[in-house]
């Protein structure tokens, strides 16, 4: 698709035309929401994800997309609701668990965050961001040994951004 090739404006126009031809095709709305999100248009992204869910409410990925937009916009209560629905719809989604765990940690619900992040790393052991976030939540919860273990896993992963962040935190901890 065009939006995956960095032609966001063109993809947006093409998807808008396609929606005009078939406004009840939820995938088009989700794709347009993704393009809008990539272009920084949160309002349109939210609107399109909501429209996709109005047409077909049982798709976890679309709930997750909407939850991410809502969390970014600071609409925490509804974001949490949408994350919970996404996790119920697809309990084996490590990405949903990671993002939900991050939201919970940001809201200082460390017990909930740790639960979701532990599930994420169990579901996808090479999801290095989940190890990093779990390490941070464990540290905030007062478990420095377990935190350092998760941060070391993240520091040894293949994601260079996560590796850098984990090494910085470990260095600050004297490890």
Image (tube, rainbow, N blue to C red):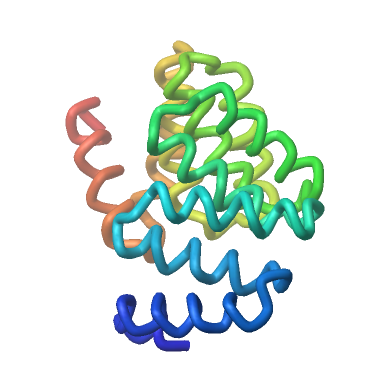
- The residue most toward the front is 20
- Please say if 127 is above or below 81: below
Location of residue 160 with respect to 75 vertically, above or below: below
Residue 120 in percent (x, y) is at 63, 45
Residue 58: image location, x then y, percent: 81, 53
Horizontal relation, residue 117 to residue 144: left or right: right
The residue lying at 37 percent from left, 56 percent from top is: 156
Residue 114 falls left or right of residue 37: right
Q: Relative to residue 19, is residue 167 drawn left or right?
A: left
Q: Which of 111 and 150 is in front in this view?
A: 111
- State the image coordinates of residue 57 (x, y, percent, origin top left): 78, 52
170 or 124: nearer the viewer: 124
Residue drawn 30% across and 77% down? 9
- Number of numbered callouts drawn: 0
Q: Nearer the viewer, residue 149 or 99?
A: 99
Q: In which quarter of the image is the C terminus?
A: top left
Which corner quadrant of the image does residue 77 belong to? top right
Query: From what the image shows, is residue 86 above or below residue 128?
Result: above
Q: Which of 124 and 79 is in front in this view?
A: 79
Q: Which residue is drawn at 30% across and 56% down?
A: 40
Q: Quadrant of residue 27?
A: bottom right
In percent of width and height, residue 122 lies at 68, 47
Name the residue: 73% across, 69% down.
24
Q: Quadrant of residue 48?
A: bottom right
């Amino acid at each position: 698709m065009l939006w995956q090739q960095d032609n966001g404006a063109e993809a947006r126009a093409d998807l808008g035309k396609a929606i005009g031809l078939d406004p009840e095709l939820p995938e088009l709305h989700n794709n347009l929401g993704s393009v809008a999100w990539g272009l920084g248009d949160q309002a349109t992204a939210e609107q399109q994800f909501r429209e996709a869910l109005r047409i077909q409410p049982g798709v976890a990925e679309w709930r997750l997309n909407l939850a991410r937009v809502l969390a970014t916009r600071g609409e925490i209560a509804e974001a949490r609701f949408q994350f919970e629905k996404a996790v119920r719809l697809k309990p084996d989604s490590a990405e949903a668990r990671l993002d939900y765990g991050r939201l919970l940690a940001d809201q200082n619900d460390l017990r909930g965050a740790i639960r979701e992040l532990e599930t994420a790393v169990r579901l996808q052991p090479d999801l290095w961001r989940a190890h990093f976030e779990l390490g941070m939540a464990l540290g905030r919860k007062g478990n420095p040994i377990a935190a350092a273990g998760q941060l070391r896993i993240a520091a040894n992963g293949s994601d260079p951004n996560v590796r850098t962040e984990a090494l910085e935190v470990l260095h600050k901890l004297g490890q």
